[in-house]
Image (tube, helix red, strand yellow):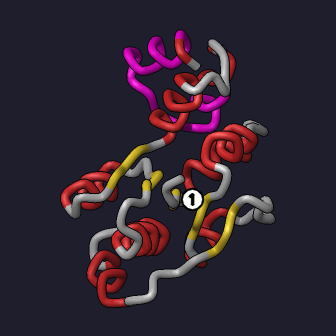
Amino acid sequence: MAIVISDARCLILFTNIGRLDILNSLFGQIWITSEVQTEYGFELPDFVLVRDPADSEIYDSLRQQLDAGEASSIALASQNPGSKLVIDEKKGRRIAAEMGLDVTGTVGVLLEASEKGLIQSNPELVALLVNEGFRLSPRLKKLLSRSA
């Protein structure tokens, strides 16, 4: 299984709706950086491990454009070829994709969990995420309500 590295937003969303089990079931293990751990602010579940980028040069460069959690997550993913990066922030996603990283977000996590049969159709799950401030287009809301 590929290494999965997450920024704070996805972890915070799933924590706030009480569904960290989705991430655990889907990925088994998730790596976060020390910066993401600070942003997350909750006690880490057993399946979340803290790993930091070995080379600070990439981080320092990214930090000029992104917040500390996003920059450190992208730097860590860039140093672990074949890893999957879970990040929702648009600018961070664009930069990571330009670096050739495998990028997904909270929506991608939900779709993958649905495809693997880990979650069933559940419009309430989508509503909970939206209530937590997660922004979805009407098209994505409809898609996730059918597949989540």
Position in image of residue 65 (x %, y %):
28, 71
Q: Closest to the observer: 9 or 25?
A: 25
Question: How many other residues sit within 10 Å of disc 1, few (<14), some (14-19) or many (≥20)?
Answer: many
41 left or right of 134 in image: right
Is residue 69 shown above or below 12? below
Q: Amino acid at mark 1?
A: Ala
- State whether residue 2 appears in this view: yes
- Residue 35 picture quarter: bottom right
Q: Nearer the viewer, residue 122 or 101?
A: 101
Image point (45%, 68%), residue name: 73
Q: Is residue 67 visible?
A: no
Look at 52% across and 37% down and name the residue there.
109
The picture places residue 54, in percent across and down from the top left corner, at: 44, 88
Element marked by disc 1:
helix
Q: Is residue 135 magenta?
A: yes
Q: Which residues are magenta?
A: 128-146
User: Where residue 84 sits in the image (x, y, percent)?
Assistant: 43, 54
Is 18 inside the magenta-drawn segment?
no
- Quarter of the image holding residue 30? bottom right
| Residue 38 appears left or right of 52 | right
Residue matched to label 1: 8
